């Protein structure tokens, strides 16, 4: 028994060094040296050097100048509730839960009020609460509204949407997705130039 | 194909087995009435608790009975009139128990009937015990101990198992073998020196050394065994019992954990229905029939006139990989017959016949007699005074026998090698043609015996071996079942190989001594195989003990019978093949009924679950379209109860075994008991539901 | 729909192409044959063996093996518990997280030691980087390696070889399998966008001017072993739905395949090591059919969507609640069935929000624990079903049942039965107790039938060492932490101990030679009977809760939708 204990402690120690120290440090070093952008979170930094988000992390958009993002259970980790660690999360509402149906109805009404034909991804909340994407259909449904607000031609907007759409992997896997963060940033940049 | 279809020739010591398939006439009248009464007596909880599956049913019956008397004892109940329903459930559960007990009681009853028949022959008798000074004292047979010497005279019932020390007498063994012809008993001989307690001496008198203490005798063991009194569970039965107990425990947990989730969704479940579901799910079918299958298996062995010392041995028969068989009496008919004389050395046919006759005049073996007959047919006559000649007995060492004539001439017959040696020792020379004759006879599968007078070899007797009809097919069956056969024979290699080929055995050992037997067994066992063998002689005892299944012939010596774990009362070595089948049947029946039992659960679930959670809006699961929740539960339970008596005949008879490969067997049995087990209850429950609905019970 | 099922077919085809390679490779490793990694791993292993103190590599007997597992797991568990309780004073804690409550720390430690990674916390708000890397990341290797070692020992025992040395197999599993694949995979994830940094959360000024706190961390190295080792404990609370854990469909494919390869490959490894590759392939095929069927059930449910919502949208749309747009319904359903089948437990969409068929499929996966099965132990669960099938079928052909020429007798049936009992005891009993006090204990967030599913799912996930959850459940309570700890321990160690003893008793049996009377286990017939045994035993045990949970919920939704139209 004692022998087992000693062997276990020694094994734990050496395996800890290997898997909890050397291995993470190796990956950390490779990341920071070779792929610093990705390793640090694919952050978006504006001209002033300020962090304005991440290409991978969605943001809440409510103004009519921006393409709406999906409903989030954690409001995209925005505000003091999320400080200091940041948040992620989902509603975890079951399909049979009346609260879900009520929320969907509410969202559908808001969208209809904004003249946007409700689409599935805009009435269902996302998994992570940080989903940066909406479906191309949802983006197209918002074109007229943005065009009116920003005084842009729908055609230009459609081009912009296409430019910010991530296709299926290898053209097969996953769903085409429009990145609302980069799309809206592009809108802003369009306005600036 | 059963034995009696293939066996046409007679064999020693009795007639064809078919004539005396059943041990003493068993009185089965009133068997079922007695079993039915017994079934109620077995409801005693102290007996029930031995069978965990049925004990759960027993407890469930008590609970529903209480709920029939007072439906509200465990708390409020929603249904309107649950008393009738609870009462019906109680009744059905009660009959489930009775049916299961009935199955066991019928099986036991059959054994008991057989035991009673045996016991009737065995009563306390007075024995004449010989004191050391030779005087006789009269004692009760129960006072006899191992090693005592007793005297029995014509008309006595032999009071104990023993070995004949002195005297020659005929004994009626019909009490145990069913064979009516008396058997000759005499000392010294392997086959005829043992006597069994309970048999009757018909003529003369015998001095016997007692070989078994009272109550431990042959008959006692047999009675205990067929009665099931000493029935200990076999390894596979134990493993299966564990599995069934665990399944029962799993379902107990499943059912016990239903009420709280059901209450959570406001669909509370009544205790009666929970009990019903539990009883329907636990493997009552196999649980109720398991012990009956085991007892019936022993009973089948007994019906074949084989006495097994344990169920374990019977079960082991199914696992046998190798059968070690003596050629004589098993593969060939016991008696070789003289077919032809082959003259050598320029002697005439007439001369060879005369010498053969002279050599065999004292030979009382069937072979010897057949030589006499053949010689007489050829016109040979005895040309010396028989009374003045001297017999030379056969011995295993010299391997020859013969006659010393009054004029001093030595006539010998025996194995070709032995005679060659004899002739050489007398200054003679074996003719070259001897080898050719030897080969010719051997290649015919016969046994060549050389005959000589002094230093002159006269010729060769061709003893013809007759292979039993149908034996080849039986070995083919065994091979398909994965059982290898090894033939042991004292014959020379050529003869042995010819016979082996004709009989279809897988391997043979020629010129085998009894010691070779044990070596063959050990060699097979070293490869992990289970070996069965038959034997009768005292020198077979070590091999019988070494073999996993050793079957001694009843005609054999006491030593052989004690070393073996089975004794064949008919002394028929081919029975090993039937025993393999019985062993397999025993396992198959258990496996098949277990599979059937578990497969049945699917239909029962589909009957009871929708009824149970009727309030949860899952009516669509009622795929059988059963009348009402109550009717569904009752139908499932009625099916559950009735299937037990319905399967009793199968449990007692055993699932029919076919000599197929394992995969073919599995396919067949899975189709019948697996798939059949899934489908049958759907149909049966639906039919019962229609009847229950029609009668208006629920 | 067609496109979605095409995606599923492609993913499965990739799995079928990859698993045999890993299966063969693992067999080579554990049979001591030469592999490509010898020059690098050889010296490293010698160093580890020497420092660990088991250079002799003495083969262990059953009791020794069990003791080694239990003692080493206990030591690791204590170390990790200590790190949690001390994380406030340990480095790498940029958000100044203090020690969690003892019961949460205990549950987390047990959950990770048992390769379950059930999380009653959210990673970014509860555990410091040091705890995540030094405690959780460490156990992700060792708990997975423990499982592989047990599976290998079991295979060895079953085929009559000695069990081997636990410490050696534990180390080899890491140096030859887990670590090399992790290094390559982590780099691939890094390139694809998964972060690896020790810097604290980024604070961003969003386009609309709000302040966003973006949790980051050393994710890449953690993410890959999380999937590879069937661990499943997310660096972030929302697991692989989080864009930093699983940013795109390249990473999603990689992670899906990576979590399947070891359990799938191990089945083939078994066939190779046992000298019966055909049997390995047949079992692989059987599991694959189960797997594909469950995927189909879940995927159709998600594709058809929620009829109650569809009536609001005025069209049939897939159920996207709790799903990420980039993965869509098909790949989320694939992931859900894969993660519950392999006992990984990582999620890329919320299982609580799956349609009832999805709930049915994920629960069934965990009840059976053999649809690939977890790292090692799941493969071993398969053997238990094989042994039970051998027992029944063996009887049915009239021979004492034998498996690999070794007789299955009482001792083996007892040990297999103990494993059969583990799930009912660890899932149904605590589930029933919790549901007896729904207000006090349960913390159910979706009431009705789904509430039953939530509770049962939590215990099933713990007992099957899965780790995923119907996460709406309020599970960070003393009751949940302790009661699931019970299920975790029963679900992990009872089968492991029984399996090792089972293997040990097989090792010491005299093999029986094969004859025509031997039932061959590498046939379609036998495999089919095994499948039937699995389905029937599984269904008989769990049908009532499945009926009260997802099945009743499905009927209820259909009923409600009917009312709307």
Image (tube, rainbow, N blue to C red):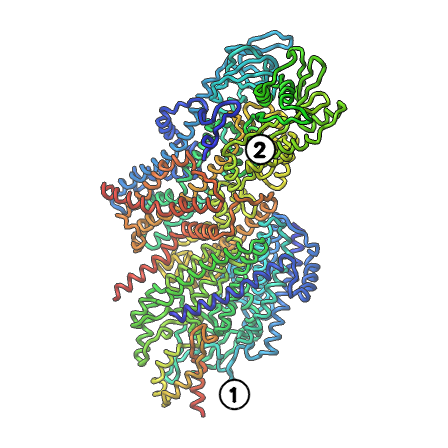
From this viewpoint, is residue C121 visible?
Answer: yes
Residue lying farthest right? B427
Which structural element holds mark 2? Answer: strand
> Who is closer to the viewer here, A111 or B116?
B116
Q: Residues within 10 Å of mark 1 (few under 14, many from 20)?
A: few
Separation of marks 1 and 2 at Cα, in angstroms = 100 Å
Residue C550 left/right relative to C27: left
Q: Residues within 10 Å of mark 2 (few under 14, many from 20)?
A: many
* Residue C562, percent from left and from top: 27, 63
Badge 1 and badge 2 both on one subunit: no
From this viewpoint, is residue B211 visible?
Answer: no
Instruction: Say which quadrant the C terminus of chain C sits in.
Output: bottom left
- Pointer 1 residue: A48
Residue lying farthest top? B135
> Who is closer to the viewer here, B437 or B622?
B437
* Residue B361, percent from left and from top: 62, 17
* Residue B228, percent from left and from top: 47, 28
- Pointer 2 residue: B325
Residue B61 left/right relative to B140: left
Which structural element holds mark 1? Answer: loop
Compared to residue B133, the image places residue B280 above or below, namely: below
């Amino acid at each position: 028994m004692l022998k087992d204990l000693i062997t276990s402690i020694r094994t734990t120690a050496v395996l800890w060094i290997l898997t909890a120290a050397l291995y993470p440090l190796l990956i950390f070093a490779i990341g920071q040296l070779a792929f610093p952008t990705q390793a640090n979170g694919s952050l978006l930094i504006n001209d002033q050097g300020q962090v304005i988000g991440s290409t991978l992390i969605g943001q809440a958009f409510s103004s009519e100048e921006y393409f709406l993002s999906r409903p989030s259970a954690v409001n995209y980790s925005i505000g003091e509730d999320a400080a200091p660690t940041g948040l992620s999360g989902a509603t975890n509402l079951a399909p049979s839960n009346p609260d879900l149906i009520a929320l969907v109805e509410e969202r559908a009404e808001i969208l209809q009020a904004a003249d946007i034909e409700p689409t599935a991804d805009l009435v269902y909340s996302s998994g992570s609460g940080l989903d940066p994407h909406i479906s191309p259909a949802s983006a197209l449904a918002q074109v007229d509204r943005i065009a009116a607000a920003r005084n842009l031609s729908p055609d230009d907007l459609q081009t912009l949407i296409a430019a910010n759409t991530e296709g299926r992997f290898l053209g097969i896997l996953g769903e085409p997705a429009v990145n609302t963060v980069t799309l809206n940033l592009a809108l802003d940049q369009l306005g600036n130039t | 194909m059963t034995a009696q279809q293939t066996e046409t020739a007679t064999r020693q010591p009795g007639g064809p087995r078919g004539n005396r398939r059943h041990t003493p006439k068993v009185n089965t009248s009133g068997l079922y009435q007695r079993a039915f009464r017994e079934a109620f007596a077995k409801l005693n909880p102290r007996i029930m608790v031995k069978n965990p599956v049925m004990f759960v049913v027993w407890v469930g019956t008590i609970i529903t009975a209480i709920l029939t008397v007072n439906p509200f004892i465990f708390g409020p109940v929603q249904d309107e009139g649950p008393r009738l329903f609870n009462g019906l459930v109680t009744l059905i559960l009660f009959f489930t128990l009775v049916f299961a007990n009935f199955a066991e009681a019928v099986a036991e009853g059959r054994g008991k009937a057989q035991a009673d028949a045996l016991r009737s022959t065995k009563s306390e008798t007075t024995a004449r015990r010989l004191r050391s000074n030779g005087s006789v004292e009269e004692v009760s047979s129960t006072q006899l101990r191992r090693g005592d010497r007793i005297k029995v005279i014509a008309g006595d019932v032999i009071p104990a198992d023993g070995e004949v020390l002195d005297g020659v007498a005929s004994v009626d063994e019909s009490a145990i073998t069913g064979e009516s012809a008396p058997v000759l008993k005499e000392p010294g001989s392997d086959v005829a020196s043992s006597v069994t307690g309970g048999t009757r001496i018909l003529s003369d008198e015998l001095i016997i050394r007692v070989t078994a203490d009272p109550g431990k005798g042959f008959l006692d063991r047999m009675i205990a065994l067929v009665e099931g009194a000493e029935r200990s569970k076999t390894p596979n039965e134990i493993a299966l019992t564990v599995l069934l107990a665990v399944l029962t425990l799993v379902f107990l947990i499943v059912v016990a954990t239903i009420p709280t989730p059901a209450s959570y969704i406001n669909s509370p479940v009544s205790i009666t229905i929970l009990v019903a579901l539990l009883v329907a799910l636990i493997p009552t079918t196999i649980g109720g029939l398991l012990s009956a299958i085991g007892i019936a298996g022993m009973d089948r062995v007994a019906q074949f006139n084989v006495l097994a010392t344990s169920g374990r041995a019977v079960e082991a028969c199914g696992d046998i990989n190798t059968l070690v068989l003596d050629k004589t009496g098993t593969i060939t008919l016991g008696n070789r017959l003289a077919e032809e004389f082959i003259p050598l050395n320029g002697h005439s046919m007439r001369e060879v016949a005369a010498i053969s006759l002279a050599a065999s005049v004292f030979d009382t073996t069937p072979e010897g007699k057949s030589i006499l007959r053949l010689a007489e047919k050829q016109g040979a006559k005895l040309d010396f005074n028989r009374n003045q000649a001297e017999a030379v007995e056969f011995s295993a060492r010299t391997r020859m026998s013969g006659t010393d004539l009054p004029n001093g001439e030595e006539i010998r017959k025996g194995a070709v090698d032995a005679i060659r040696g004899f002739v050489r020792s007398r200054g003679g020379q074996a003719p070259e043609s001897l080898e050719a004759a030897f080969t010719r006879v051997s290649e015919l599968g016969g046994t060549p015996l050389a005959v000589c007078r002094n230093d002159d070899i006269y010729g060769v007797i061709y003893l013809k071996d007759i292979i039993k009809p149908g034996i080849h097919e039986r070995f083919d069956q065994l091979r398909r079942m994965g059982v290898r056969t090894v033939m042991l024979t004292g014959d020379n290699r050529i003869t042995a190989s010819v016979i082996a080929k004709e009989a279809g055995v897988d391997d043979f050992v020629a010129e085998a001594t009894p010691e070779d037997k044990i070596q063959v067994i050990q060699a097979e066992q070293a490869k992990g195989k289970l070996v069965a063998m038959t034997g009768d002689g005292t020198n077979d005892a070590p091999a019988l003990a070494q073999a996993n299944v050793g079957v001694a012939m009843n005609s054999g010596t006491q030593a052989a019978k004690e070393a073996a774990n089975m004794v064949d009362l008919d002394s028929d070595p081919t029975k090993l093949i039937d025993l393999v089948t019985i062993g397999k049947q025993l396992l198959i029946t258990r496996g098949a009924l277990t599979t059937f039992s578990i497969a049945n659960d699917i239909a029962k679930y589909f009957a009871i679950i929708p009824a149970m959670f009727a309030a949860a809006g899952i009516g669509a699961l009622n795929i059988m379209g059963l009348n009402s929740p109550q009717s569904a539960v009752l139908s499932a339970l009625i099916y559950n109860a009735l299937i037990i008596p319905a399967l009793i005949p199968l449990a007692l008879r055993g699932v029919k075994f076919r000599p197929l490969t394992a995969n073919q067997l599995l396919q067949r049995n899975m189709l019948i008991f697996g798939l059949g087990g899934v489908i049958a209850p759907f149909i049966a429950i639906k039919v019962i539901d229609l009847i229950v609905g029609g009668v208006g019970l629920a | 729909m067609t496109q979605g099922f095409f995606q599923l077919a492609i993913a499965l085809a990739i799995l079928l192409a990859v698993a045999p390679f890993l299966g063969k490779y693992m067999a080579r490793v554990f049979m001591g044959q030469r592999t490509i990694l010898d020059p690098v791993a050889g010296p490293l292993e010698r160093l580890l063996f020497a420092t660990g103190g088991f250079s002799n590599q003495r083969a262990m007997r059953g009791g020794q093996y069990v003791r080694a597992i239990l003692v080493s797991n206990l030591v690791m568990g204590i170390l990790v518990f200590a790190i949690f309780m001390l994380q406030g004073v340990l480095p790498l804690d940029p958000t100044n997280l203090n020690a969690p409550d003892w019961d949460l720390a205990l549950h987390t430690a047990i959950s990770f030691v048992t390769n379950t990674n059930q999380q009653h916390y959210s990673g970014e708000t509860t555990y410091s980087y040091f705890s995540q890397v030094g405690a959780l990341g460490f156990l992700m290797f060792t708990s997975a390696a423990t499982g592989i070692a047990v599976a290998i020992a079991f295979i060895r025992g079953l085929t009559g070889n000695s069990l081997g040395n636990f410490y050696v197999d534990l180390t080899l599993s890491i140096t030859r399998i887990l670590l090399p694949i992790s290094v390559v995979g982590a780099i691939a994830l890094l390139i694809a966008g998964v972060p690896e940094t020790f810097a604290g959360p980024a604070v961003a000024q969003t386009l609309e001017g709000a302040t966003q706190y973006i949790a980051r961390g050393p994710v890449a190295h953690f993410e890959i072993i999380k999937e590879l080792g069937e661990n499943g404990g997310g660096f972030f609370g929302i697991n692989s739905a989080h864009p930093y854990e699983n940013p795109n469909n390249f990473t999603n494919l990689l992670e899906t395949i990576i979590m399947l390869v070891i359990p799938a490959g191990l089945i083939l490894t078994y066939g190779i090591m046992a000298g019966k590759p055909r049997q390995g392939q047949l079992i692989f095929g059987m599991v694959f059919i189960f797997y594909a069927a469950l995927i189909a059930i879940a995927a159709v449910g998600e594709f058809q969507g929620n009829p109650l919502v569809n009536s609001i949208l005025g069209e049939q749309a897939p159920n996207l609640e709790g799903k990420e747009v980039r993965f869509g319904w098909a790949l989320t359903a694939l992931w859900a069935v894969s993660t519950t089948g392999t006992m990984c437990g990582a999620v890329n969409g919320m299982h609580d929000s799956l349609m009832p068929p999805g709930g049915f499929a994920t629960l069934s996966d965990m009840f059976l624990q053999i649809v690939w099965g977890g790292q090692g132990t799941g493969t071993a669960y398969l053997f238990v079903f094989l042994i039970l099938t051998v027992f029944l079928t063996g009887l049915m052909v009239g021979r004492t049942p034998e498996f690999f020429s070794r007789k299955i007798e009482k001792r083996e049936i007892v040990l297999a039965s103990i494993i059969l009992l583990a799930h009912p005891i660890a899932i149904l009993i605590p589930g029933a107790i919790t549901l007896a006090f729904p207000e006090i204990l349960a913390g159910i967030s979706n009431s009705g039938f789904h509430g039953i599913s939530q509770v049962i799912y939590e215990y099933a996930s713990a007992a099957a060492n899965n780790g995923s959850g119907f996460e709406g459940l309020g599970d960070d309570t003393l009751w949940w932490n302790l009661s699931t700890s019970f299920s975790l321990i029963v679900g992990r160690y009872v089968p492991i101990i029984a399996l090792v003893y089972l293997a040990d008793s097989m090792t010491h049996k005299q093999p029986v030679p094969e004859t025509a009377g031997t039932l061959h286990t590498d046939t379609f017939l036998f495999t089919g009977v095994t499948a039937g045994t699995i389905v029937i035993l599984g269904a008989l045990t769990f049908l009532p809760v499945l009926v009260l949970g997802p099945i009743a919920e499905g009927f209820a939704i259909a009923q409600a939708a009917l009312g709307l139209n």
